[in-house]
Amino acid sequence: MSPRILRTPRISEGLPHPLGATWDGLGVNFALFSANATKVELCLFDPTGTQEIARIELPEYTDEVWHGYLPDARPGTVYGYRVHGPYDPDAGHRFNANKLLLDPYALAHVGELRHVPEIFGYEIGHPDGDKSFDTRDSAPFVPKCRVIDPAFTWGNDRRPRVPWERTIFYETHVRGYTIRHPGLPFGQGGTYSGLAAEEVVSHLRDLGVTSVELLPIHMFADEGHLAQSNLTNYWGYNTLGFFAPDGRYASGNGSYVSEFKAMVARLHQAGLEVILDVVYNHTAEGNEQGPTVSFKGIDNASYYRLLPGRERYYINDTGTGNTLNLSHPRVLQMVTDSLRYWVTEMHVDGFRFDLATILGRESYGFDEGGGFLDSCRQDPILSDVKLIAEPWDCGPGGYQVGGFPPGWAEWNDRYRDTLRSFWRSEATAAEMAQRLCASADKFNRRGRRPWASVNFVTAHDGFTLHDVVSYNDKHNEANGEGNRDGTTNNSSWNCGAEGETDDSAVLSLRERQMRNMMATLLMSQGTPMILAGDEFARTQGGNNNAYCQDNDISWVDWTRLDKFSSFYQFTRRLIQLRNEYPILRRQRFMTGDYDEDLGIRDVTWLNPAGEMMRQQDWHDTNQRCFGMLMDGRAKTSGIRRPGTDVTLLMVLNGNHDDVEFVMPPCSGGAHWHLILDTNRPGMTSGRAYTIGSACEMVGRSLMLFKLEA
């Protein structure tokens, strides 16, 4: 049934570009890509989005773009689309004009998605399944788009442009990070403005991180099975709108688009970069049994990768039901337009790409010279911001750590797994040495730099640092899946008791293990990433897959900052040491090769006798105490001249037992001064060790020494 027309809006042809709804100061141009549609209707709603007040056919079709110009439309106009065309799932077409559709380029939304039968293009329960056709109107149950005026007073906002070698990522969640912050007034916690509050910003600055990496803030939807279980998609990896910040993180005081921009400006003012975790690999519409709320009803055959010869079904390289078809030029354009929008209009500083292997996969497989990766590399805007790949997915050839092209950084899960295993006395010195040197075995090619390896011990997906040392097994019962969800391969160790305990010996060992892991992370070459709250031992009670827990399980408990203040201060000191000593963040890979001109090695690996590691040492699977001597005289650029950095010696003992380590000779110094000991976290002035003297290394501990004359 058509809506009751309250007025007849004037409409002209308008332009096929830019795509989306664009306010030019006089009216709004509407443009929507669909290669296979036969007609597109623009539907206008009242300001609340509850009543459809007009339905207007877009008058022109140019280069597969439907377009029209409304001179009477203004910012605040609420709209959606009804797209006509064939409903033929076997051919990949799922047009159903009874379903109101979101504009893929919408800059803001109003309302929420309700999981009811009306939002599906087919009749649920029909014998023909998704090949049936549902005639009910979905408009009352789906969000709508809102035209905005993008004007914002940025003042003198500037991107901090933190150099890669000084970057320390801090992964966090807008809502979960601040909702329990005791210093924020009621209503501000869990919002964009809450993240920009002085109480929060001062903590980030005091800690010393440089770049705040936000879990997805693009407009997203909860999955139907979660809604039925009274759970939510807390993490947000279920995008519906690639150009709009999600309104559920708004404080309600004005435009949430402006609130997001104000947050970015405040973080920039504090010298902090804003990195967005983005999900361009799939959408919230799922597979053939999923709802029709946007792309599926606009042009299913163009937007999604479909099985060749069986176009009713979707290629599912994401594990979520569908995969965006970035091989299509208009879909590729949408993604790159979105990225440029967030840089130019929202002033963000970079992106972490979820399941990024998909973005580099063409029909024939992953290609580091594929269309999307090439687009980013040559784009003058995108090539100037930080680009970080999650280099895996569940498709064929999906694991691509080290396989992305120059200019990209990558999450390095090999670092995480090796470090965790080493500190529970499993990984060998040979394995660990590679990870300490920015995984040169993976990344030292094509002129890539050590920063390309984003090192992490923990991330949103998995155990927190506290839980890595407190649980042998996952405890995901609250997720409602019988503890079957989440990985069982955690490389964790509870130090003698599962979960909470009063055993002082277990608690002492756990804190030392946390110090060992945090120290290793921040002393390693490459780019470190810290999970929010790890600096004061945040816990999820052993839940390693808290994607659906918008509650105390996932929210940061700020009372732990006082309880674990000593560990917080220890983490601060580690970051200060990393900043103080450039050799801990070199721009060249350490290779251990002998420099004939300088007569030195940039890194020398030492056994407990203080001697250079021999082949038998490297092959000894029980060798877990070793030293990493980083010579400050090694060249730091392609020019053959000595460096001027301080020479450091890091000694790691991953054994259960204490080990004596003999202090090695090094030209230019008479003794080694201890500056860090994970067994003595409060140490302010360490002992000086003469060359050839023995240092007692406590089991499972790390020490850092500075060479002095």
Image (cartoon, grey):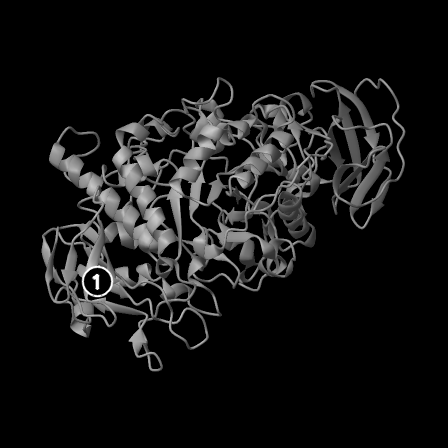
Answer above or below: position of 691 versus 542: below
Q: For numbered disc 1, what is the local secondary structure? A: strand
Is the N terminus in the top left, top right, bottom left or bottom right quadrant?
top right
Residue that appears at 45% across and 75% down: 639
Q: Observer-nearest residue: 315 or 685?
A: 685
Horizontal side of 421 relative to 645 (left or right) equals left
Q: Amino acid at mark 1?
A: Gly
Residue 448 position, x and y percent, is: 47, 65
Q: Residue furthest bottom?
A: 596
Residue 37 position, x and y percent, is: 76, 42
Q: Observer-nearest residue: 14 or 378?
A: 378
Residue 671 sits in quarter: bottom left
Q: Residues within 10 Å of mark 1 (few under 14, many from 20)?
A: many
Residue that appears at 17% across and 67% down: 664
Answer above or below: position of 634 versus 219: below
Can I make out residue 285 in this image?
Answer: no
Residue that appears at 56% across and 23% down: 251
Residue 199 position, x and y percent, is: 45, 28
Is the C terminus in the top left, top right, bottom left or bottom right quadrant?
bottom left
Residue tagged 1: 627
Horizontal side of 387 relative to 100 (left or right) equals left
Residue 384 position, x and y percent, is: 59, 55
Residue 2 sits in quarter: top right
